[in-house]
Amino acid sequence: MFEKLRIREHMEVADANGQHVGTVDDVANDQIKLTRTDSSDGQHHFLAMENVDRIDDNRVYLKAGTPIPMGVGAN
């Protein structure tokens, strides 16, 4: 999956509307690990790689309707 290789640490993650969801901490297997600093509960959260719609510049956009974990997007 070529898109997976383009996702790097510190990239912004946004929902389908361009709203900030979080920041990439790591990519492992088929999941994007988000930084704890972007969550209201201070925990890492994960998004499935299958929810990535596209990558533009330094931003990962999620597909419309992607469920966002509770506590994410606090900033």
Image (spheres, grey):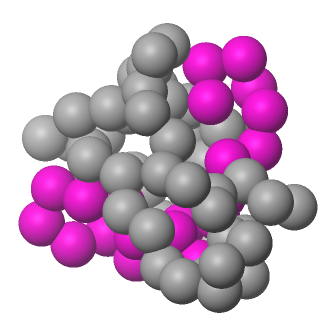
Apparent side of residue 50 relative to residue 36 in the rendered image (left or right): left
Q: Position of residue 63 (x, y in %)?
A: 44, 20
* Vertical relation: 45 (above or below) 42: above
Q: Is residue 75 magenta?
A: no
Q: Position of residue 23 (x, y in %)?
A: 64, 64
Apparent side of residue 27 relative to residue 43 in the rendered image (left or right): left
Q: Residue at x 43, y 27 (%)?
A: 66
Q: Residue at x 65, y 86 (%)?
A: 42
Q: Position of residue 11 (x, y in %)?
A: 62, 60
For the stretch drawn in magenta, the main secondary structure is strand
Apparent side of residue 2 relative to residue 62 in the rendered image (left or right): left
* Vertical relation: 31 (above or below) 1: below
* Vertical relation: 36 (above or below) 55: below
Apparent side of residue 45 relative to residue 28 in the rendered image (left or right): right
User: Which quadrant holds the N terminus?
Assistant: top left
Give residue 57's quadrant in the image. Answer: top right
* Vertical relation: 49 (above or below) 29: above
User: Which quadrant holds the C terminus?
Assistant: bottom right
Is residue 9 at least partly visible in the picture? no
Q: Position of residue 41 (x, y in %)?
A: 65, 79
Q: Which residues are magenta?
A: 15-35
Is residue 18 at least partly visible in the picture? yes
